[in-house]
Image (cartoon, coloured by chain):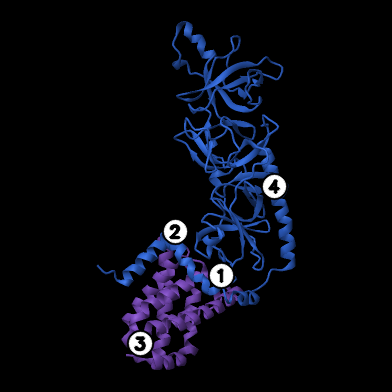
């Protein structure tokens, strides 16, 4: 059987258009022809001016500070259980709503099973092993977080108080069919719907979970759920807990890691071909053979340039779009909001303004300047991306 | 002949990138007169490979999926080749007309591919302006065609 060349060409074209990575990777090969004359092209192109560099350096510093302050806010309320351990902000790779868990990226060999996972002082859940009999919590740099309410999450000693001076009502937060369930309320205590519940310091019983982490809002059982007679009293002592945070929408969470365990980051340095457009895309003079893979982040002097769309053997294609997920939006007053460019995801009563800075973060390298808001519309905002310095080096590393 | 074509296309492609850096989308695409020459006078045996290389090179320069540009140039070629016998009768004018038809079809195919696949495939003004370049090059193109190409 023979294949007509034209059919093969059309099939490959469709493979390329449907973003089939083997074809997309192979088509990068032709850019080797651009390399010999690329230096000459660079000389002939418009250059990056001095004021642009100064302005950019200032904005980059502000972006780093914004990311740093956001990380501090994310860690707030949590504390490490041991001097050999520290709190780290780690990215969520995949939220699994059906399994009531999150998959997070962690430094290899640096986390323990049962470590508390928090965000802004709210307890979200605990790390659990990949398999029941497995000792390792992390596999290939990924770990599972069993969210509160997941049957695999351990019970939590909790309490609520009517006021700071009032005696605490203690209870145990367990997992039930309807999510986090309140049980074993202290004998003298009663529940009140709407009250906030916090973790209780139970270190005297050997529990390393710190007290004071927010758990959620107490909700008494509905009257219809309770049988009559003497059991009616249980309505005051049993209930559910409503979470205040939708854990599945979080991009980053906080957990304990061993001090000084480094992240294993694939990283390389390269340049962009001057011969390629600087509008929304660019081509790197390095590819798979230099350790670049699809989805890697491309950065130049603290400025987020883009994400690798397709990596060929010796060249890669970079798209200058924001990475999917949340970014930080920084107002001139320094207010930092983590959101996506879509207005549906914005916090209530919050509207960004033109000129506000947009910051993209990385688990190891912190915040990078991604640009400024160019336009705000009913569907969201668009971002004016900073210019690429054609003569500068680029750093490429995995997300 | 294909090697020569690739060298010329790479050189002119780089010139296009520089002019695009200064003039934006008002820079004419010099690959259009080359593609028109290939479509009208190139030996039939290697015309497919030559056009694939031209589309692929344009995609490399513009950092786009090569499939879009290759498909667009092949669609444009299919239309020009249908008119080939008529265009050859008009000699230089036929070459210029062919270049404009090719640029228009290439541009249209790029727009259609863009909207069909939701991927940015560059076409438009640059290609049509590239057709203008065929006017001063028409004489050279005819000489080359008489010497190396197929003019019947």
Residue under pointer 3 = B87
Mark seen at residue A66: 4
Q: Is residue A112 above or below residue B55?
A: above
Point out the frontmost of discs 2 and 3: 2
Chain that bears disc 3: B
Q: Are marks 1 and 3 in contact (CB under 8 Å)?
A: no
Q: Is residue A196 left or right of residue B7?
A: right
Q: Chain of mark 2?
A: A
Tell me which numbered mark, 2 or 4, is placed earlier along the sequence: 2
Residue bearing the label numbered 1: A276
Residue A372 location, x and y as percent?
65, 56
Q: Please give the name of the residue rendered at 51% of the width and 11% of the height, measured from the top-left corner.
A: A234
Q: CA distance from mark 3 to mark 4?
A: 63 Å
Q: Hue of chain A? A: blue
How far separated are the C-alphas under marks 4 and 1?
32 Å
* Secondary structure found at label 2: helix
Mark 4 and mark 1 lie on one chain; the one further toward the N terminus is 4
User: Where does label 2 land, which residue?
Assistant: A21
In 3D space, how far apart are the residues under numbered discs 2 and 3 (Cα atoms)? Answer: 40 Å
Quadrant of the rendered structure where residue B80 is?
Answer: bottom left
Give the answer, above or below, for where A117 lies relative to B48: above
Give the chain letter at badge 1: A
Q: Colour of chain B?
A: purple
Q: Quadrant of the N terminus of chain A?
A: bottom left
Whether residue A192 can be seen here: no
* Mark in front: 3 vs 4: 4
């Amino acid at each position: 059987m023979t294949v007509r060349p034209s059919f093969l060409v059309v099939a490959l074209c469709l493979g390329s258009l449907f973003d089939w990575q083997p074809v997309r990777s192979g088509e990068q090969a032709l850019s080797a022809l651009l390399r010999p004359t690329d230096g000459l092209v660079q000389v002939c192109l418009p250059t990056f001016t001095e004021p642009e560099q100064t302005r950019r350096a200032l904005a980059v510093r502000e972006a780093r500070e914004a990311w740093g302050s956001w990380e501090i806010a994310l860690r707030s309320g949590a504390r490490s259980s041991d001097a050999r351990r520290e709190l780290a902000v780690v990215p969520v790779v995949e939220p699994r709503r059906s399994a009531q868990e999150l998959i997070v990226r962690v430094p290899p060999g640096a986390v323990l099973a049962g470590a508390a996972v928090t965000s802004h002082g709210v307890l979200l859940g605990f790390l659990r092993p990949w398999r029941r009999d497995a000792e390792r919590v992390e596999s290939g740099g990924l770990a599972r977080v069993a969210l509160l309410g997941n049957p695999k999450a351990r019970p939590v000693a909790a309490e609520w108080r009517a006021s700071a001076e009032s005696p605490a009502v203690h209870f145990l937060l367990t997992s039930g069919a309807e999510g986090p369930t309140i049980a074993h309320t202290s004998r003298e205590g009663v529940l009140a719907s709407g009250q906030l519940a916090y973790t209780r310091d139970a270190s005297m019983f050997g529990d390393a979970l710190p007290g004071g982490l927010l758990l959620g809002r107490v909700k008494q059982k509905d009257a219809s759920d309770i049988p009559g007679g003497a059991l009616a009293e249980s309505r005051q002592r049993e209930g559910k807990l409503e979470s205040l945070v939708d854990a599945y929408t979080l991009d980053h969470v906080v957990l304990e890691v061993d001090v000084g365990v480094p992240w294993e980051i694939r990283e390389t340095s390269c340049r962009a071909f001057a011969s390629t457009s600087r509008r929304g895309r660019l081509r790197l003079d390095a590819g798979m053979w230099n350790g670049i893979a699809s989805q890697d982040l491309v950065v130049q002097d603290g400025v987020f340039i883009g994400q690798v769309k397709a990596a060929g053997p010796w060249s890669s294609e970079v798209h200058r779009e924001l990475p999917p997920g949340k970014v930080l939006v920084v107002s001139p007053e320094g207010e930092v909001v983590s959101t996506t460019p879509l207005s549906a995801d914005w916090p209530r009563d919050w509207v960004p303004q033109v000129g506000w800075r947009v910051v993209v973060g990385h688990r190891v390298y912190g915040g990078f300047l991604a640009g400024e808001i160019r336009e705000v519309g009913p569907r969201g905002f668009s971002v004016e991306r900073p210019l690429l310095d054609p003569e500068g080096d680029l750093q490429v590393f995995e997300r | 002949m294909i090697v020569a074509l690739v060298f010329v296309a790479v050189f002119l492609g780089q010139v296009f990138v520089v002019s695009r850096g200064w003039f934006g989308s008002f820079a004419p695409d010099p690959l259009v007169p080359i593609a028109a020459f290939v479509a009208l006078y190139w030996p039939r045996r290697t015309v497919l490979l030559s056009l694939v290389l031209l589309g692929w090179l344009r995609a490399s320069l513009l950092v786009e999926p090569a499939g879009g540009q290759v498909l667009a140039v092949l669609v444009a070629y299919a239309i020009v080749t249908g008119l080939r016998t008529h265009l050859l009768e008009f000699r230089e004018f036929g070459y210029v007309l062919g270049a404009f038809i090719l640029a228009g079809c290439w541009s249209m195919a790029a727009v259609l591919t863009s909207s069909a696949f939701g991927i940015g495939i560059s076409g438009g003004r640059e290609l049509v302006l590239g057709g203008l370049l065929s006017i001063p090059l028409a004489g050279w193109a005819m000489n080359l065609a008489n010497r190396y190409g197929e003019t019947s």
